[in-house]
Amino acid sequence: MVVAIAAATACGGCRGAYLVRLAYEEARFLGSATPATEMLATAQDPARRRALEALLAVRTFAAQEGLNVKGSYREVADTGSVAPFHVVTAAYADRLEPYTWWYPVIGAIPYRGYFDQESADAFAAGLDAEGLDTMVVEASAYSTLGWFDDPLPSSVLDRGEGAVVVTVLHELVHQTFFAPGEVAFNETLATAVAWRLAERYYASTGDAERAAKMDKARRAWVARSDVLDATAERLRAFFADAATRRLAREQILEERSALYADVLAQIEKVDATFAADLGEGGLDNASFLASHRYATGGRAIDEFLAQSPSIAAALARLDAAVASKQDLRAVVAPQPAVPARGEGAHGGAGV
């Protein structure tokens, strides 16, 4: 996840109070960080040692794979066992569209981050009073796009070495590639790259079992992305029809509730765990979009990565696309097969 702290260094007067407080809290967070090497030297718990060793090793691996590591995640910030960051996200109730905030450098983003739960809840309550769908979620880690040497929250270590590997790789993708205003693409890309590199990382260590688990997790994520993409199309069609029929807000919400219930029932038939996670706390436009933005068009992006010579080459191609203002979705879209020389249009021998 990307936070707006980078914007605070670029525009002190833009949403000043919020950004100044965010920068202040980031400074406190950075100040609590301890080098991972120092922690490893004194750590006694075997699981904690494995997590710290994985943190140091995956940074080196990421750099070898072409990710922009800089000084990020070589330190660990003490957050206890809780997530350090609380994210407020919102969406319009009568259409599948996120409510966004605009900042310099990063552009429009569909969430605001807070270092304390109380402030996040208060802000979300104000949005809810305006009639928006809202939710507050915890973020285990985040990226400032290389503006700071981000430390890893200690709560990630508590989740084990696998979580450390995937989380660090995901956030380093943001530090390597970022398309302003393209949050869903950025998050989906980072997720896809993290799964592929995590598998490759464990393969490089000789841990075939964990490599296989990462491959299985990636395939499951691609399948879930397909489900979310199809659901998004169904929701857009519903809201378009509701607008055509000029339904009252109350009727829209009633029919939307029935549609989401049916969506969860259909998903539960093929992936009960995913359905439970998606429906936890109630499903609305804000919670659906919060899940979908990490898996929007995931299959196309995953296949784009598979067809690229390397992850570094794929990210470089996307960087060039951003610079030339190309449509990123078109860049990663599957390309039609070109018949081999000497073949006819139907794949047979040419005459």
Image (cartoon, rainbow, N blue to C red):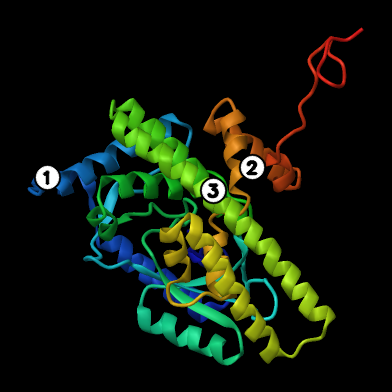
Counting from the top left corner in percent of width and height, residue 34 is at 22, 54
Residue 28, image quadrant: bottom left
Nearer to the camera, 56 or 257? 257
Distance CA(mark 2)–CA(mark 3) = 12 Å
Q: Residues within 10 Å of mark 2 (few under 14, many from 20)?
A: some
Q: Residues within 10 Å of mark 3 (few under 14, many from 20)?
A: some
Residue 41, image quadrant: top left
User: Relative to residue 49, is residue 287 depicted above or below?
Assistant: below
Task: Evaluate whether residue 190 shows in this view.
Answer: no
Q: Is residue 289 left or right of residue 62?
A: right
Return the residue at label 1.
Answer: 46
Q: Is residue 314 left or right of residue 70?
A: right
Residue 80, image quadrant: bottom left
Mark 1 is on which residue type?
A: Pro
Q: Nearer the viewer, mark 2 or mark 3?
A: 3
Q: Nearer the viewer, mark 2 or mark 1?
A: 2
Return the residue at label 2.
Answer: 300
User: Disc 3 or 1, which lies upstream in sequence?
Assistant: 1
Distance CA(mark 2)–CA(mark 1) = 39 Å
Please report the residue visible at 65 percent of the width from the left and 35 percent of the height from the top. 317
User: Disc 2 or 1, which lies upstream in sequence?
Assistant: 1
Q: Nearer the viewer, mark 3 or mark 1?
A: 3
Query: Which element type, helix, strand or loop, lies under badge 1?
Result: helix
Return the residue at label 3.
Answer: 223
Q: Spot the residue most to the right.
A: 351
